Image: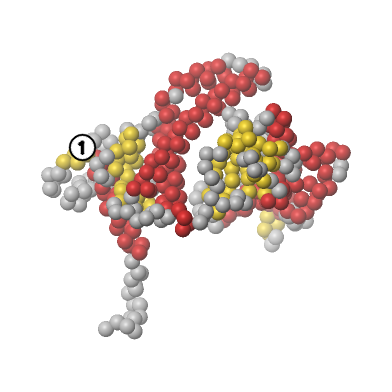
Amino acid sequence: MRLHFNFRVYPTPSQALNARRVFGCKRAVWNEALARIAAVKASNKLLGNPTNRIAEGPWMQIPKNPDLAKELITSAKKTPERAWLSDAPVGVLQQTLRDLDKAWAAHEDSKTGRRAGPKVEPPRFKSKKDTRQTARFTRSDRWSITTDGKLRLPKIGDLRVKWTRDLPSEPSSATLVKDSSGRYFASFVVESDPATDILPPTDGDQGLDLGLTRFAALADGTHIHSPKYLRRAEKKLKKRQQELSRKQKGSKNRDKARVKVARAHAEVADARRNFHHQWSHKLTSENQAVYAENLNARGLARGLHAKSLHDAGWAQFLIFLDYKAARRGRTFAKVDRYFPSSQICSTCGFRDGPKPLHVRTWTCSECGAVHDRDWNAGKNVRYEGRRLTVAAKAPPTPGPGAPESKHSG
């Protein structure tokens, strides 16, 4: 399994300057390559179908990576106008062209349906005013981790790293990231041996009903308290936003105020991510199987409770549950979002019909059982998750008209 490990790094002022130069070289190569590819694609699009052209003109070949690398990197370094490209490792610039290829492929595949999910926009030009910058160092750049625990990146230097855990294997790449709040991180891609991560089997499973008042109601009758990090930080965020709005546009003080706003938001995001990690770790460690609803978080976040939904971060939590369950040999399944978990009595299975959101407790008209809305939904999610898991493991049944097996009878 391929995993990403992120660690905080602390560059010196000179190393931060070198990092900004690397970011700038990467940005220049990206923008120049994007301009050339986009121009060719736009010209070919005007021609239309070769058999039914809209305009006259030659059909041009899309520039390939080797040709772009030779022209925009190798040859450009030898010119006085682009000699500053030597401030960045060659591998970083070549990786930039590969990333651009992947961005175009994702856009084209999403249009043709080969890529599942929402439509992917075409690549955009990068700006030096972008608050987030990245640079990926591959093995060809000969980066390394020194004996004293520093990250040695070519053209930047030896960066001090705050190691919080050991890497399970030798990383294949290292990415230097500068976020909106001015912090630097190193992201490593490593291959993890599944056999070392699998936990011993345990009894029990759990169903989750995600909500806003309670972050999640569990099938065993307990619940996860909703921390509401964004709501708790609203007063501080409001003050920082007011300070930013009073600064003159383009001034250095405005940039300092922007960093303060970004740091306040980063604190909220870090606290929420840590909360999701802790509970996804606990649930996948203590249960053999975990089931949750496949909620349309993107669609729900367009409604009245958009801020609360973003504050909860359901999508990120389900992603953490998914990969941690796969890593530890556990089962994680998503119940269909249209499954009526709040309408079914978890005691007798009678469907009692839809209920408005303000109804938090109800009595089953069939068996008379009194249910808490959320805990009842959690139990039904667990029952449905068990059914889906058993159905997925069962052998397929032959359809009507299928020939009988020679072992039958």
Residue pictured at 25% horizontal, 44% vertical: 220
Q: At 51% across and 48% down in the image, what residue appears?
A: 118
Q: Is residue 129 above or below residue 33?
A: above
Q: The C terminus lies in which quarter of the figure?
A: bottom left
Q: Nearer the viewer, residue 136 or 195?
A: 195
The three-letter code of the residue at mark 1 reads: Thr
Q: Position of residue 201 (x, y in %)?
A: 35, 56
Callout 1: 10 Å neighbours few (<14), some, many (20+)?
A: few
Q: Is residue 47 left or right of residue 371?
A: right
Q: Nearer the viewer, residue 326 or 200?
A: 200
The reply to whether residue 104 is in sight is: no
Report if residue 258 is visible in the image.
yes
Marks counted in the figure total 1
Please state which of residues 357 and 27 is positioned toward the viewer in this rendering: 27
Instruction: State which quadrant residue 21 falls in.
Output: top right
- Which element type, helix, strand or loop, lies under badge 1? strand
Which residue is rendered at x = 16% and y = 41% of the image?
Answer: 370
Instruction: Measuring from the top left, give residue 73's x and y in whole percent.
Output: 79, 46
* Residue at the spot of label 1: 361
Q: Is 271 left or right of 68, judged from the image as shown?
A: left
Q: Position of residue 169 (x, y in %)?
A: 56, 52
In percent of the image, x 43 and y 49: which residue is there?
Answer: 324
Residue at the extreme top of the image, as rendered: 246
Q: Is residue 346 above or below residue 162?
A: below
74 relative to 172 in the view: left or right? right
| Residue 5 point in image, percent of width and height | 54, 44
Q: Which colour style is shown?
A: secondary structure
